[in-house]
Amino acid sequence: MSIRLKSRKEINLMRAAGRIVHEVHNLCREMAVPGTTTRAIDDAAQKLIDARGARGLFKNYPTYKPGEGFPSTLCISVNECVVHGIGDDRPIQDGDVVGVDCGVQIDGWCGDAATTILVGDVAQDVRDMCAATEHCLQIAIDQIRPGKRWSQIARLMQKYAEDRGYGVVRDFVGHGIGSTMHEEPKVPNFVSRELLKNDIHLRPGVVLAIEPMLTLGSREVKTLDDGWTVVTLDGKASAHYEHTVAVTDRGAEVLTDGR
Ligand code: MG
Ligand code: MG
């Protein structure tokens, strides 16, 4: 496994991409009110990305079927949808949790981040799960420093989630990121034999997209017939938070927080 290390200059370019992602998140947060469709949010996100001279990384993202790439700009994943939801004409309803994942490239460098937007009167157990998922991401950010192994951090994230009864999704993980969206290594939110065998040694210049996905019920998921939309098998709600994070000699530098 080879991780491509990024220079300070490259990390700064990734931050410029991250700023646009952050702006898109803010736009989504403003727009995600009852009655608005996820398609309208997706269209507005595309316009903003175009206006910044950037390129959305998800649209037309290839699948194993030739000519059938991902159809929308954002992944918009509502309620039981975990990831890779497609914007459509269903209006958002009070009580929905709307996961928004956005990746852009500008000047050859990428940023990728996700957040879950709570719309109106969200059930308390779902609210708590969203907070726990965001906290798992914060654990990673707080723990990152050179010399650590990723498995040490993944263990803490997994423990925090499972101690509270949440499912930690196994089928999807974070990833290295740089001039392309998906680079080595795979960045799981749990400890596996595979990770322990092939651990990630954190050092300055490693840049990871860290993206915990938790479920209120079982951690099992399935993909719908559209070939993309991933939902929980038991139909219970799910949450997803992600930041692009650079390891520096001082710790973690979050590149998608809008700074
Ligand atoms: Mg993402
Ligand atoms: Mg990602």
Image: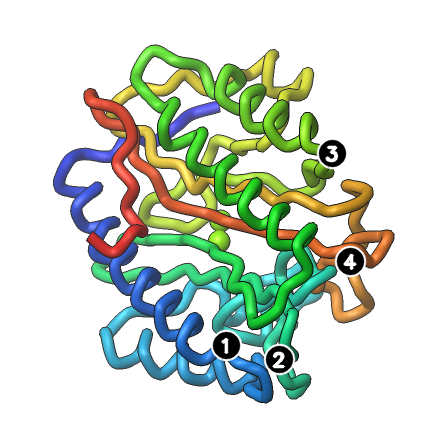
Q: Nearer the viewer, residue 111 or 181?
A: 111
The residue type indicated by label 4 comes to: Thr
Which secondary structure, mark 3?
loop
Cα distance between the residues tagged 1 and 3: 28 Å
* Residue 67 visible at all: no
Alpha carbons under labels 4 and 3: distance apart: 23 Å
Q: Is mark 4 within 8 Å of ligand 1?
A: no
Relative to 108, residue 27 above or below: below
The Cα atoms of the two marked residues, 2 and 4, are separated by: 21 Å
**Residue under the point 34% across and 38% down:** 245
Dot 3 and dot 2 residues touching (CB under 8 Å):
no
> Which image quadrant for residue 166?
top right
Q: Residue at coordinates 29% horizontally, 41% vertically from top-left?
A: 254
- In the image, what residue type sits under mark 2? Ile
Please tell me which of labels 3 and 2 falls first in the chain: 2
Q: Which color scheme did the rendering employ for the protein?
A: rainbow
| Kind of residue at disc 1 | Ala
Type of the residue with mark 3:
Gly
Q: Earlier in the sequence, mark 4 or mark 1?
A: 1
Comes first in the chain, label 2 or label 1? 1
Element at label 1: loop
**Is there CB contact under 8 Å for labels 2 and 1?**
yes
Residue 123 is left or right of residue 243, and the answer is right
Mark 4 vs mark 3: give the one in front: 3
The residue tagged 3 is 165
Rendering coords of residue 53 (x, y %): 24, 74
Would you name the residue on which mark 1 appears? 32
Instruction: Tell me the SS state at disc 4.
Output: strand
41 versus 15 height, above or below: below
Q: Earlier in the sequence, mark 2 or mark 4?
A: 2
Q: Which residue is mark 4?
A: 223
Viewer-nearest of discs 4 and 1: 1
